[in-house]
Amino acid sequence: MKKATDVFFHMLEILLVLLLSGMALMVFVNVIMRYAFNSGFVASEELARYFFVWVSFIGAVVAFREHGHLGIETFVMFLSRRGRIVCMILSNMIIILCSAIFFWGTWKQYPINASMTAPVNGMSMIWVYGIGLFTGGGIAIIALERLFCLLTGRVTEEEIAAFAGENLTIEQLAERT
């Protein structure tokens, strides 16, 4: 299962690279077209904005999996192992709640966004705003898995150290166990 999850997130990272490259290429070509030929591709501006939205929201899921989001490590690093675990449980519960609200809001807006079309390329706006389903669901699933590991005692010292903002070597982790 871990192998499949790693492959899935690797594919997401490739998708992020492609989206970012596409966005940069479209903007660059449009700038050259406007400067050199006094024209441009109208659809590229719209697609670049949509790619930016997708990069941001898909990147949020990837960053959450890698513990890449900001945290209040100053407080947590002074806590004991038990205090850190309690904070991890509380923060994951809050994250699940916020992600569920985000998912639910996107779900409720689905019919409205599906019926609207983009002004230039005519694409359904659910392709833009529907990414909230992936982001809300993805972050909630990761947080649920972390919460399950915390409640069943399967959390590793490396995860606890990452939560506290400590970048420990393997030797330092071995000393703690």
Image (cartoon, rainbow, N blue to C red):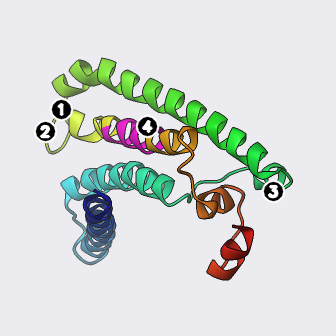
Q: Earlier in the sequence, mark 1 or mark 2?
A: 1
Give the magenta-colored segment's residue range: 134-144
Dot 1: few (<14), some (14–19), or many (≥20) neighbours within 10 Å?
some
Q: Are marks 1 and 4 in contact (CB under 8 Å)?
A: no
Q: Of 5 and 40, which appears nearest the observer? A: 5
Dot 3: few (<14), some (14–19), or many (≥20) neighbours within 10 Å?
some
Q: Are marks 2 and 3 in contact (CB under 8 Å)?
A: no
| Residue holding disc 1 | 117
**Residue 142 colored magenta?**
yes
Residue 168 appears anywhere in the view: no
| Residue holding disc 3 | 77
Identify the mark at residue 140; answer none if there is no mark: 4
Q: Earlier in the sequence, mark 4 or mark 2?
A: 2
Amino acid type at mark 4? Ala
Up-down: is 83 above or below 25?
above
Q: Are marks 1 and 2 in contact (CB under 8 Å)?
A: yes
Q: Of 148 and 22, which appears nearest the observer? A: 148
Q: Earlier in the sequence, mark 2 or mark 3?
A: 3
Amino acid type at mark 3? Met
Q: Earlier in the sequence, mark 1 or mark 4?
A: 1
Query: Which numbered mark, 4 or 3, is in the foreground of this view?
Result: 3
Query: Which numbered mark, 1 or 4, is in the foreground of this view?
Result: 4
Amino acid type at mark 1? Thr
> In which quadrant will I find the C terminus?
bottom right
Instruction: From the viewer's perspective, tell me whether residue 159 is left or right of residue 55.
Output: right
Farthest residue toward the front?
177
Q: Residue at x 23, y 33 (%)?
A: 126
Please tell me whether mark 4 sits on a helix, a strand or a loop. Answer: helix
Please tell me whether mark 2 sits on a helix, a strand or a loop. Answer: loop
| Residue holding disc 2 | 122
Query: Which numbered mark, 2 or 3, is in the foreground of this view?
Result: 3
